[in-house]
Image (cartoon, rainbow, N blue to C red):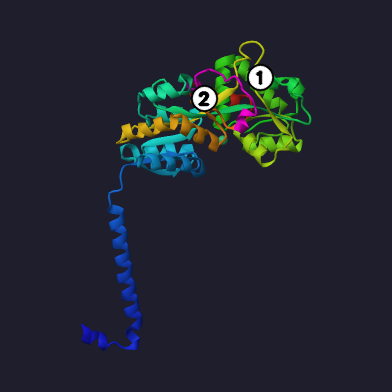
Amino acid sequence: MLKISCLLTVKDLPIMIFRSALVFSLLLSLVACGRSEEPSGPELVVYSSRIEQLIKPIFDQYTAETGVNIRYVTDSAGPLLARLRAEGENTPADILVTVDVGNLWQAAQQGLLAAQTSSVLNNNVPESLRDPEGRWTGLSIRARTIVYSSERVKPEALSSYEALAEPQWAGRLCLRTAKKVYNQSLVATMISADGAENTERVLAAWVDNLAVPPFSSDNKVIEAIAAGQCDVGIVNTYYLARMKADDPSLPVDLFWANQTGEAPFNRGVHVNISGAGVTAASKQKALAMSLLEWLSEADAQHAFAELNQEFPVNRNTPPSSLLQHWGDFKADQVPVVEAGRLQAEAIRMMDRVGYR
Ligand code: FE
């Protein structure tokens, strides 16, 4: 061998370099393989429609406390549900985390979530924010309420979602698209409280009152009010919280809808959840459930809710100081599962009245 290598000429040098590079990279990959085969302790796989920056800090804390690693895949709810369906029994996912009960309800209907009982969850999460069959639980509360121009609207003029159908709001209302599950869930709970006929009348009048066609996001609704395109709208509070944090002088304020007046208009603000469930195909359901239980405890609740300026589901955890500034509100007590159950009817109704 030595003899042969001594006989090498300059012409052979590129081949030599190529061969050493090959050997080197082979060695590297062997080292890498060795590493990935090392036992690394328990691991949970989470499919999440919440973006990484909203879940990573809290999952890192869980790993630090328990030694359980968490690997996550983030995408929108639709693609994650499709992926779970396609992977079936072979999915690596142990937990689905998503926002809006409409999405959790869909996942449960499609058989993607396992029915679980947990006394910890029963204790920490109000019944109205959990699936009656134990397939998902709320982890934070999001309130969807009325916002208004602090320059052109007196809050005394506001009362309920339904009252935005009145002629005084003609050409002054901004809404987000009916395609967004947030609005489908809101309308579903209106059907539950007001009945189908009354809700359809309200929706038709909302459409008549629109200043501009529905927007693609809650942020755009708030921006349009600030810019004077319209005077009132309906958004999730955390969007306004974030924008107010960036610009405290933003001339848009929040009004807690449906607090007073006669039933059913005094039922409280529409609340929805971000939540999670253990997947039906998880091979480690007990470990997966212990993560959900940990997330429902007071400390984790504080961090989980604060990351997105949402409200904790656990009554023993106070909301962030920014949210406390908006004061207490009465929340609609209708079980959130109703929003899922009536989702299809809400979508058909919005379509009928031309709310796109
Ligand atoms: Fe959102």
Residue 181's image quarter? top right
| Spot occupied by residue 233 in the image (x, y as percentages of width and height) | 68, 29
Looking at the rendered structure, the kind of residue marked 1 is Glu
Q: As displayed, is residue 192 above or below residue 249? A: above
Q: Nearer the viewer, residue 321 or 263?
A: 321
For this orientation, the residue located farthest to the right is 152
| Spot occupied by residue 137 in the image (x, y as percentages of width and height) | 44, 27
Main SS of residues in magenta: loop
Q: Residue at x 31, y 88 (%)?
A: 9
| Quarter of the image that includes the C terminus | top right
- Residue range in magenta is 321-338
In three-dimensional space, the C-alpha distance between marks 2 and 1, rounded to whole angstroms, equals 18 Å
- Is residue 14 on the magenta stretch? no
Mark 1 crowd level (few <14, some 14–19, many ≥20, 10 Å Cα): some
Q: Nearer the viewer, residue 40 or 334?
A: 40
Q: Is residue 302 left or right of residue 69?
A: right
Q: Which residue is drawn at 39% across and 25% down?
A: 120
- Asked if disc 1 is less than 8 Å from ligand 1, the answer is no
Tag nearer the camera, 2 or 1: 1
| Spot occupied by residue 55 in the image (x, y as percentages of width and height) | 48, 40
Which disc number belongs to residue 162? 1
Q: Is residue 313 left or right of residue 14?
A: right
Residue bearing the label numbered 2: 343
Q: Which residue is drawn at 71% across and 21% down?
A: 158
The image shows a total of numbered marks equal to 2
